Image (cartoon, rainbow, N blue to C red):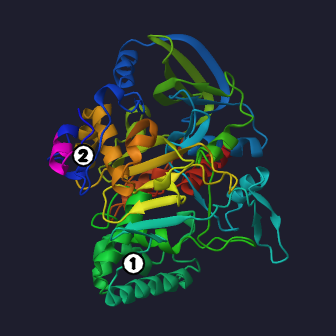
């Protein structure tokens, strides 16, 4: 292949993107390297082959070890790690956590490439409300919160508050500061954007008939006022039109935010969830305005690493153990887990009580007595890529920000994972973490298409998007790894957050309590942490 630019149609055809509705990129051509000198990298993600091994183990379990403990935690994502953290806070150390993957962290996991840290999922934490006491305690323990001022406002560690410059948007061929469209936006649309934010400010002040704010984090602290909950019965798109907000640029921005936090667009997202995104983030501090964020090179992987600190391998945490059966027994609970490193061998864990810290689509197959996955629970597939690029002397990236987004694109752009480095000290290389939720069709169909595409397809797809933002960048890409999240996060469609299925899913089954962000309907760190703490307290009380 020559180093000549491909036409858009040639590129889409060669990359296998033509006709793939949710994945069709618009605009820009890609000047590719010689085929013999392709960008190195790999396609990563949860091992789908484990499903076959799971079926074999269920048919012929061979138990080679029995472990007895007080409390069992199934799942080492944020919720499971938070449950373990809370148990230790309460003085309980007799527990075992079983994790299917080779490391804990779930979709907040981080990674390392050529000594550069980067996220594989969630990459920031909004500065929390001081009323979220367990989370604030965890942050204090780990020096994220360094103390409080005379007005009892938290003082956040400056090392972790996102450094400037923070956000920029490529719109109408030019980069502007901030993600709210402004450059080239007609005055009439700018007026609508101002009116939208005035609506948000009003919602931030609203108190329900139960004395609670309309929106809060965790969502359990939000008002249950029926007038507010009505928002869950319509889409965010319908709410915008109801308010006379039909600006194309505003719709794009709100759609971007919904896809960023929920993995679905304004046409599918619950208006309650959409408003929660904007109106619930009221945290701040002595040195941080409301809306400020905390971030680390490995994203929220830093937080899961801190939750993991102090847990002993082989005793409290057993990794690569896939639980395929969890049931109540006369004397407590019992789990059977396939040892993924020893073909056909299983571990039995017997405990007084259990926290199942996995998603509902797994619980439906694993927890005995579960009524099955309710159709209200659907999960968005995501693609995440990490590109290691030359940074020093790279004119295309000379004004790189933390968050870099292109208007009107299917992707959410990329995050510069090295933003928290010392300013003025430009490293030789940088990690760019690229994100895209696969929206625009049913999750099952999107997931199927995502899994069918190989690394060459995804390399071409991601590079086309990065090239659109930075023409010529391909020559400076040293490695590109791609991660597929088949069930990246729960989707808060209308009726899901306030319906009966989510309320039923939160109920324990005997001595088995549940903890996962999908029980909040919103897949953010704070909700997963909250669910883990709640479940830990519940099993302690049994």
- Quadrant occupied by the C terminus: top right
Q: Is residue 513 rendered to the left or right of residue 408?
A: right
Tell me the number on the disc at residue 183. 1
Query: 261 and 8: which one is in front?
Result: 8
Q: Main secondary structure of the magenta part?
A: helix
Q: Is residue 150 rendered to the left or right of residue 69?
A: right
Point 35% across, 89% down: residue:
187
Give the number of the mark in front: 1 or 2.
2
Tell me the number on the disc at residue 5. 2
Q: Secondary structure at mark 2?
A: loop
Point 40% across, 41% down: residue:
475
Give percent across and percent down for residue 395. Answer: 49, 54
Point 48% across, 18% down: residue:
340
Q: Residues within 10 Å of mark 1 (few under 14, many from 20)?
A: some
Which span is picked out in magenta?
6-13
Inspect the magenta stretch and tell me whether residue 283 lies in it: no
Point 59% across, 80% down: residue:
211
Inspect the magenta stretch and tell me whether residue 7 lies in it: yes
- Gap in angstroms between the C-alphas marked 1 and 2: 29 Å
Choose the circle earlier in sequence order: 1 or 2.
2
């Amino acid at each position: 292949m020559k180093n000549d630019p491909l036409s858009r149609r040639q590129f889409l055809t060669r990359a296998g993107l033509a006709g793939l509705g949710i994945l069709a990129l618009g605009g820009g051509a890609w000047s590719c390297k010689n085929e013999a000198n392709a960008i190195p990298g790999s396609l990563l993600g949860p091992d789908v082959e484990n499903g076959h091994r799971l079926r074999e183990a269920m048919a012929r379990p061979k138990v080679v070890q029995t472990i007895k403990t007080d409390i069992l935690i199934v799942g080492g994502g944020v919720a499971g790690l938070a449950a373990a953290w809370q148990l230790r806070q309460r003085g309980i150390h007799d527990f075992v956590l079983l994790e299917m993957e080779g490391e804990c962290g779930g979709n907040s996991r981080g990674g390392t490439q050529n000594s550069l840290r980067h996220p594989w999922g969630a990459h920031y934490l909004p500065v929390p409300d001081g009323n979220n006491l367990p989370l604030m305690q965890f942050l204090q323990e780990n020096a994220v919160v360094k103390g409080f001022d005379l007005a009892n406002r938290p003082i956040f560690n400056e090392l972790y508050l996102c450094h400037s410059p923070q956000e920029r948007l490529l719109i109408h061929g030019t980069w502007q500061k901030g993600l709210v469209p402004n450059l080239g936006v007609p005055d009439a649309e700018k007026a609508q954007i101002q009116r939208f934010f005035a609506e948000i400010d009003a919602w931030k002040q609203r108190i329900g008939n139960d004395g609670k704010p309309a929106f809060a984090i965790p969502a359990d602290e939000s008002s249950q006022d029926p007038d507010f909950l009505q928002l869950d019965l319509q889409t965010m798109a319908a709410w915008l039109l109801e308010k006379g907000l039909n600006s194309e640029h505003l719709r794009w921005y709100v759609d971007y935010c919904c896809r960023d936090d929920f993995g679905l667009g304004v046409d599918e997202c619950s208006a309650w969830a959409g408003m929660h995104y904007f109106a619930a983030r009221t945290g701040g501090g002595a040195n941080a305005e409301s809306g400020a964020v905390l971030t680390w090179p490995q994203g929220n992987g830093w937080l899961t690493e801190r939750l993991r600190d102090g847990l002993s391998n082989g005793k409290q945490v057993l990794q690569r153990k896939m639980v395929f059966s969890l049931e109540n027994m006369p004397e407590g609970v019992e789990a059977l887990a396939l040892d993924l490193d020893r073909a056909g061998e299983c571990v039995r864990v017997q405990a007084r009580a259990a926290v199942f810290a996995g998603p509902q689509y797994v619980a439906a197959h694993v927890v005995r007595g579960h009524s099955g996955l309710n159709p209200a629970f659907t999960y968005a597939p995501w693609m995440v890529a990490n590109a290691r690029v030359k940074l020093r002397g790279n004119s295309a990236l000379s004004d790189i920000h933390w968050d870099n987004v292109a208007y009107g694109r299917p992707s959410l752009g990329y995050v510069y994972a090295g933003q928290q480095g010392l300013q003025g000290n430009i490293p030789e290389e940088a990690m760019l973490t690229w994100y895209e939720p696969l929206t625009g069709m049913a999750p099952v169909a999107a997931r199927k298409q995502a899994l069918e595409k190989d690394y060459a397809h995804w390399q071409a797809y991601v590079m086309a998007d990065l090239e659109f933002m930075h023409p010529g960048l391909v020559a400076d890409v040293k490695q590109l790894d791609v991660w597929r999240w088949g069930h990246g996060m729960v989707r808060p469609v209308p009726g899901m957050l306030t319906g009966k299925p989510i309320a039923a899913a939160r109920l324990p089954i005997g001595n088995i309590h549940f903890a996962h962000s999908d029980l909040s309907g919103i897949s953010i760190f704070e909700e997963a942490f909250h669910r883990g703490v709640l479940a830990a307290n519940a099993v302690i009380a049994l």
